[in-house]
Image: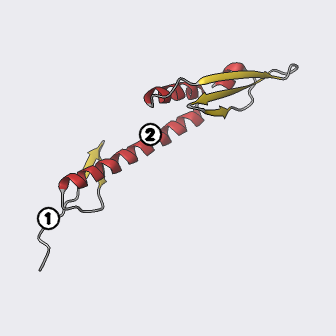
Amino acid sequence: MKDHLPKFKSTVWVNNLGYISLQTFQQHKLVEALVAEITFSAIWQKLITKASDHIYEDKTLCKSIMEEYVVAMKLQIPACNTKKLGSMIPAFRSFVTVDKDTYTGDVCITKKEAEQ
């Protein structure tokens, strides 16, 4: 006896790109949920990659991107601490704490550059 239950696949189109469910399901709501998750994950990964590319191109965007991220994720506002290193040749290093994690920046010539 053959299985006569229908099987569904789905595609989501965003900006002329199709995101397709590779699996089939007997309930169309399950396949729609799966393809929505696939679409979201793919778009999110593209956004992360694009943001990373901008950061490497222009370091002045880093502080703004971080602030937008913590607001979007509803995290505590980051705490930035910049220290002057040495006394003869000015050098600065910044430390940023975001949601209990502290990140250390590179040594820079100006305080502004260190904070970025």
> Crowding near pointer 1: few (<14 within 10 Å), some, many (20+)?
few
Left or right of residue 47, residue 23 in this image: left
Q: Position of residue 35 (x, y in %)?
A: 29, 52
* Residue position marked by numbered label 1 in the rendering: 6
Q: Position of residue 19 (x, y in %)?
A: 31, 52
Badge 1 amino acid: Pro
Identity of the residue furthest to the bottom in this view:
1
With respect to residue 40, does 1 lie above or below?
Answer: below
* Residue position marked by numbered label 2 in the rendering: 47
The quarter of the image holding the N terminus is bottom left
Residue at (71, 32) in percent of width and height:
106
Identify the mark at residue 34; answer none if there is no mark: none
Left or right of residue 113, residue 19 in this image: left
Q: Position of residue 12 (x, y in %)?
A: 26, 48
Out of 67 and 100, give the one closest to the viewer: 100
With respect to residue 39, does 76 lie above or below?
Answer: above
Badge 2 amino acid: Leu
Along the polypeptide, which appears first: circle 2 or circle 1? 1
